[in-house]
């Protein structure tokens, strides 16, 4: 079977377990997985039960598809993601996004934890992603293109949907949640960047840096979905301060802003 057929197969399996058609998809980044607890009438499907999903390799990252209702809207939440640095094929990294699309989802909100490069950012800030820079050395669309999923050369000039991004920003402001916007640089990882790399990223226009999101956004745009992205700035990027980088800081900061983040996402889902 090819990827398209696998996607349909996985989609049919999920549809057979749920009795709603999700409209909005959400991918939860590091430390933000608790958002899935907000889903009412939830059906939780572990990734390893879904045909063609790969095994989850990172400790502490739950791998569940959670479907149900948030703010009266039918949603499908990816609680945990496949990272390229885990050694997965890039096509497997984006496979869950393709399956969400096959369920009928038009709007996808991608979240992540990221290091702050922009001098105006401090840990705990949320940043709407206005654009990205793909520095992963890979593209999920490389190889043969399947026209049933999307075009060979998809336009990426408006990869992050401006109407959705504006709604996230205005909603955050109305809730007095501080929100920034900027450009996300996606690197392969898993080592954090060196200070010299962060200086380079700053020079080429990046405001935040992380190890996810970029392949997922490309695949979602390829399939014609509306994509929005939100980074939780969990730490100063390397060399911005003297402090060494530590995954613990990433999860602790994400934990600290979790409540704001959950209420913002819930409100956004109700209006998109
Ligand atoms: N760099 C890369 N990925 C990250 C960072 C970082 O500083 N923080 C959270 N994810």
Image (cartoon, rainbow, N blue to C red):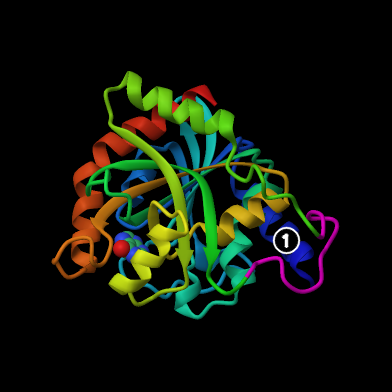
Foreground: 125 or 102? 125
Foreground: 198 or 257? 198
Q: How crowded is mark 1: few (under 14 residues within 10 Å), some or many (20 or more)?
A: some
Find residue 268 and report its horizontal and vertical position in percent.
45, 28
Q: Residue furthest right?
A: 147
> Residue shown at 26%/67% (left/top)?
238
Residue 207 in view (yes/no): yes
Find residue 112 and report its horizontal and vertical position in percent.
40, 53
Numbered disc 1: secondary structure? helix
Find residue 130 and report its horizontal and vertical position in percent.
51, 42
- In terms of secondary structure, what is the magenta stretch mainly? loop
Q: Residue furthest bottom?
A: 87
Q: In the displayed structure, does residue 77 sit left or right of residue 35?
A: right
Magenta highlight range: 139-152
When the figure is inspected, residue 257 is found, relative to residue 115, above or below; the finding is: above
> Residue shown at 33%/48% (left/top)?
232
Q: Does the magenta stretch include residue 140?
A: yes
Q: Name the residue under label 1.
A: 9
């Amino acid at each position: 079977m090819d990827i398209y057929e696998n996607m349909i197969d996985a989609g049919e399996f999920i549809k057979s377990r749920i009795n709603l058609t999700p409209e909005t998809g959400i991918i939860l980044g590091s430390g933000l997985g608790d958002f899935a607890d907000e889903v009412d009438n939830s059906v939780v499907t572990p990734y390893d039960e879904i045909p063609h999903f790969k095994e989850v390799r990172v400790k502490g990252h739950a791998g569940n598809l959670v479907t149900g209702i948030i703010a009266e809207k039918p949603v499908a939440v990816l609680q945990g993601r496949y990272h390229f640095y885990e050694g997965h094929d890039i096509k497997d990294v984006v496979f869950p996004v393709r399956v969400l699309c096959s369920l009928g989802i038009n709007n996808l909100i991608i979240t992540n934890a990221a290091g702050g490069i922009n001098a105006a950012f401090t840990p705990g800030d949320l940043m709407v992603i206005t654009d990205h820079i793909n520095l992963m050395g890979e593209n999920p669309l490389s190889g043969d293109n399947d026209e049933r999923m999307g075009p060979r050369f998809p336009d990426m000039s408006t990869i992050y949907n401006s109407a959705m991004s504006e709604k996230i920003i205005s909603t955050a402001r109305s809730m007095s949640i501080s929100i920034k916007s900027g450009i996300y640089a996606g690197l392969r990882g898993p080592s954090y960047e060196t200070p010299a790399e962060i200086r380079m990223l700053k020079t080429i226009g990046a405001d935040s840096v992380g190890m996810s999101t970029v392949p997922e956004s490309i695949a979602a745009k390829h399939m014609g979905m509306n994509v929005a992205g939100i980074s939780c700035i969990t730490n100063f990027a390397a060399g911005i301060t003297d402090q060494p980088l530590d995954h613990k800081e990433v999860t602790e900061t994400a934990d600290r802003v979790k409540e704001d983040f959950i209420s913002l996402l819930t409100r956004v889902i109700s209006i998109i």
